[in-house]
Amino acid sequence: MIKMSHKHILMIIACVAVISLFVQFIYGSSLGAQIIITIMGAYFVLVMLAEMIQTIRHGQYGVDLLAILAIVSTLAVGEHWAALIILIMLVGGDALEDYATNKANTELKALLDNSPQVAYRITGDQITTITVNEVAVGDQLLIKPGEVVPVDGMVISGTSTVDESSLTGEARPQPKQPQAPLMSGSVNGDHAITMQATQLAVDSQFQQLVKLVQHAKNTPAHFVRLADRYAVPFTIVAVLLAFVAALVAKSPQRFAEVMVVASPCPLILAAPVALVSGMSRASRNGIVVKTGDVIEKLARAKTVAFDKTGTITNGHLSVDAITPVAGVDEQQLLQLAASVEQHSNHVLARSLVDYAQANDVPLLPVNDVQEITANGVQATLNGQLVQVGKRKFILGDQVVAPTKYTAIYVRQGEQYLGRITFQDQIRPEAALTMQSLQQHGVTKLMMLSGDQTATANRVAELVGINDVRAELLPEAKIAALASLTPAQRPAVMVGDGVNDAPSLATADVGIAMGAHGSSAASESADLVILKDDLAKVATAVTIAQATMRVAKQAVLIGLGICLVLMVIAAFGVIPAIIGALCQEVIDTVSILWALRARSARELLGN
């Protein structure tokens, strides 16, 4: 399409139209009006031709050829007013697309509109206004009634309700009291509260979402190319029909009349409008989709793979049992393990440290802390190396009594000290989510877990997953996804942790549980679920399928109407200028149909 600004194009066409009308009807010179419109039309044809060639070089199939042929043929047979209407149609289509896209983007823009700018830092008895970028971790901030939370943090005094709807899709304000977490971008209710910053502004939840939204808005959708492929056979049919009609009628006029109603350039814009509408609908459901490509792939998903801890389970593990070897007491085992784990951000480490602190077990200072990815943590304590982690990392091939629960093992120097087991609650919505995915065409459900086999099998059996791969390192998860056959793709990976980031990036669609997950997972994923709700995975698939259904309907409806009008025009029933007006109506209908992807009723299949 023409890359000039719509304002300039409309000004040019408006001026040319007024001048041409003046020349023909005031001065009585039809030839003069024809020359003026022909010069303008030739200019725009050259611009469109250059851009069409550029589009083809990028591996995409454009439909500008039909518009070019329509303009050239109408100018060639003296239907200059029809050519002018076609140009108005093209610019009008762009303007209508802008309107539709802006309308569909309303919910996405809501995130940007809530962007926090300032914060009120409390220092002693003083309250200072600072920019959000000046907030440091540990700062105490005052959040006034009705104000946006500037950075991620925790309530330290006061109670209130906070509106998190623009972040999580949860419509009800959430109650907040001391120790409750706060997300940047949420809006405080009627009472002032004091919070402590736990993240810098650049690392806070809201800024991560802004980056995702901006990426979503700036990345073109793959389905645009798919829609253009519809236009390739359509272009061939249109040109052949116009040529045959002109040959039978022995009139080049007939060729122009058919080509006028076959010019669907704005019509194909219906596809990206539908995709942006679907992305907007997803955003309102607490799901940020980065690109239109994701919508298309997710709608056709055949395999969905899940991480276990923090994804299928809540990730809030509690210590179940402490089992030391002979000669080691429980408190000693707990103290050593928690002291080493206190510097780790892993969910097991947090649970273990919390348990130790709740039981008044003092943590010892450690040195040379090193986290071994997907295996465990090691540190030096009192001059000895203490290692905490998976069975194989600690024991190698040594055999110990099996357990069905998640466990960490502890070794000091060369001595094995024992293990600590944890219980994790399966998400109540997990089983229904698996059923819903299968009902929506997903044929393969997998669990790719770094946890031990017995634990993974127990969880998988309870939620309805029959393909379990356990005790996997990150590279093994990638290999498992790569081994899927073409019939099992597109493949979706759902996870929440740093260890999941490589597999999320490898999958055809990576979905991050972003409410409590790591920023690495969110950045690697194609889609981020803002609310801590696994059922949103099924919701995302539902929205994607409905969006693609509407997108294809919009394209096919427009092409179908064009085809009918082409056949009618082939018999000489539709004059060129009337055909040009009909095409504008067709384009409008198609784009308005695409906007149905925003409606709740359509996306719920009602």
Image (spheres, rainbow, N blue to C red):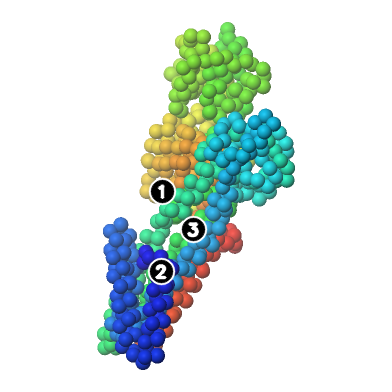
**Nearer the observer, disc 1 or disc 3?**
3
Q: Is residue 240 left or right of residue 598?
A: left
Q: CA distance from mark 2 to mark 1?
A: 46 Å
Sequence-first tag of 1 and 3: 3
CB atoms at circles 1 and 3 under 8 Å apart?
no
What separation in Å lies between label 2 and label 3 (alpha carbons)? Answer: 26 Å
Any part of residue 23 in sight = yes
Residue 460 falls in image quadrant: top right
What residue is shown with label 3?
Answer: 276
Residue 241 relative to residue 481: left or right: left
Left or right: where does residue 69 sit relative to residue 382? left
**Which residue occupies the foreground of this view, 200 or 436?**
200
Give coordinates of residue 132: x percent, y percent.
56, 40
Write down the residue under mark 1.
Answer: 489
Crowd class of label 2 (few under 14; some 14 to 19; many from 20; radius 10 Å): few
When the figure is inspected, residue 241 is found, relative to residue 452, above or below; the finding is below
- Residue 29: percent from the left, percent from the top? 34, 90
Kind of residue indicated by mark 2: His
Q: Quadrant of residue 63?
A: bottom left
Residue at image point 51% right, 12% down: 381
Q: Is residue 249 placed above or below 187 in the rendered structure?
A: below
Q: Nearer the viewer, residue 534 or 383?
A: 383
Residue nearest the observer in this picture, 553 or 43: 43
Q: Looking at the figure, which quarter contains the C terminus? A: bottom right
Residue at left offset 70%, top offset 38%: 193
Residue at the image point whose x is 67% and y is 44% from the top = 188
User: Counting other residues with Cα less than 10 Å from the Cα at mark 1, is it few (<14), some (14-19), or many (20 or more)?
Assistant: many
**Which mark, by number, is residue 8?**
2
Query: Which numbered disc flags the more N-terminal residue, 2 or 1?
Result: 2
Residue 426: name its quadrant. top right
- Element marked by disc 2: helix
Q: Is residue 86 above or below residue 5?
A: below
